Image (spheres, grey):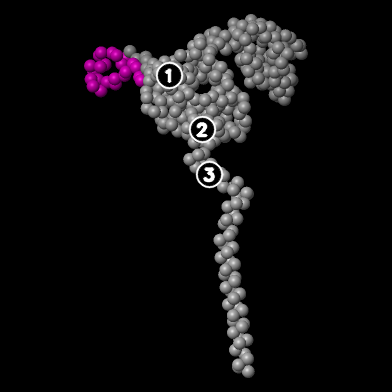
Amino acid sequence: MQIFQLPQFIRKLSTRVLAIFLGVVLTVSCVSVLPSHAETAPDQVVAQKPSAAIGNSSFVTAAVNRVGSAVVRIDTEKTITRPVDPILEDPFLRRFFGDGFPQMSPTEQLRGLGSGFILDKSGIILTNAHVVDQADKVTVRLKDGRTYEGTVKGIDEVTDLAVVKINAGSDLPIAPLGSSSSVQVGDWAIAVGNPLGFDNTVTLGIVSTLKRSSAQVGISDKRLDFIQTDAAINPGNSGGPLLNAEGEVIGINTAIRADAMGIGFAIPIDKAKAIAAQLQKNGKVAHPYLGVQMVTLTPQLARQNNTDPNSAIQIPEVNGVLVIRVVPNSPAATAGMRRGDVILQIDSQTITTAEQLQRVVEDSRLGEAVQVKVQRGNQLQVLSVRTAELQDIS
């Protein structure tokens, strides 16, 4: 019996060893084959693209390389004079107190910092008005370290834009300009400038919203519709470019909210190009105005006012713009506009918000008579208002 059992035992053992061996071989084969299949799978290839875009060839790098050398740093110096109290100049008090008497200088040097970018090879630079306004000295530093004295060619405080000229030959790099009219919410936004003195700083975000009015931002003395972005913008960024993913300038970084994080604002480049052309030619920009202080009115707001027993006036319960003050000697005053009037139309265009009214007036021609339809109480009237230059306001 043992003679016949031995071969059977050996056969069983051989079968088990062969099965284990084949299992190991198949496992190793699968491990070596699977990676090659993973490399050629179309869905896996697509998944690998973002990692390549984060490297040295990212769109941000390409955009900054395209415009970076045209971005400049602007340093300003301004001397302010302070009135000196006559008591501090009294010789008797100086002799009495001696060296302990305070020494007050009537002048003080203020220094500022901002950004800008070169528009053309002749040395024209676009920046914010508040960067160079009332500066006694303007110094422009290029990215390659070259430094030039800048001359302010024109300032427009209403749109916070200024043009500066440097004499640096004709080999200057220029920033490619895009179109802000094609910008959409969610587009990439790249801010370049010198925030807090840190030169050549780049931050990345998106376009958060469009046509954010200066009134909403809290800058009531400006006439602007901003591009809002979450790209980090800090003091020193003012005047620097906001770029799209192709490295084209779509805006000029100009304002931040001190009480908010991740919110910055830029002047649309289409508006800036038009203003810059006028500043180069005339040194200033003439803005038409009517001469009213106003707020947006809705039927609900009017109803709240009219049901208040302490209300000074009754307001028509309509959609429009309520005149809360008429500036003396202004075009509106000359035309007979009154406090409490509700502006409904300008030249047959329906007006529903104060921002819209401001836009329509800004786009009108200086000295042009516009037909303003107002509701005064229960009556409708049409007033002919001839616009005048905003700077004429005393």
Please report whichever mark, 3 or 2, sits nearer to the chain's N-terminal start.
3
Looking at marks 3 and 1 on the same chain, the residue that comes earlier in the sequence is marked by 3
Q: Which residue is mark 1?
A: 170
Tell me the distance, in whole angstroms, between the alpha carbons under discs 1 and 2. Answer: 23 Å
Nearer to me, 27 or 115: 27
Residue 230 picture location, percent across and down: 55, 34
The residue drawn where x is 61% and y is 87% is: 7
Mark 1, mark 2: which one is toward the viewer?
Answer: 1
70 horizontally vs 393: left or right: left
Quarter of the image for residue 150 reads top left
Q: Nearer the viewer, residue 165 or 156?
A: 165
Which segment is the magenta one? Answer: 87-116
Q: Name the secondary structure under disc 2.
A: helix
Per the image, the residue denoted by label 3 is 52
- Number of numbered discs on residues: 3
What residue do we see at 62% from left, 27% from top?
Answer: 182
Amino acid carrying mark 2 in the image: Ala
| Residue 272, image x, y percentages | 54, 20
Instruction: Name the image quarter holding the N terminus.
Output: bottom right
Q: Residues within 10 Å of mark 3 (few under 14, many from 20)?
A: few
Q: Please tell me whether residue 96 is drawn above or below residue 245 in the rendered image.
A: above
Q: In the image, which disc is placed on residue 337?
A: none
For label 1, the SS is loop
Q: CA distance from mark 3 to mark 1?
A: 38 Å
> Any magenta on residue 100?
yes
Q: Residue at x 38, y 18 (%)?
A: 149
Q: Which residue is mark 2?
A: 63
Dividing the picture into quadrants, the one containing residue 353 is: top right
The disc, 1 or 2, on the residue closer to the chain's N-terminal end is 2
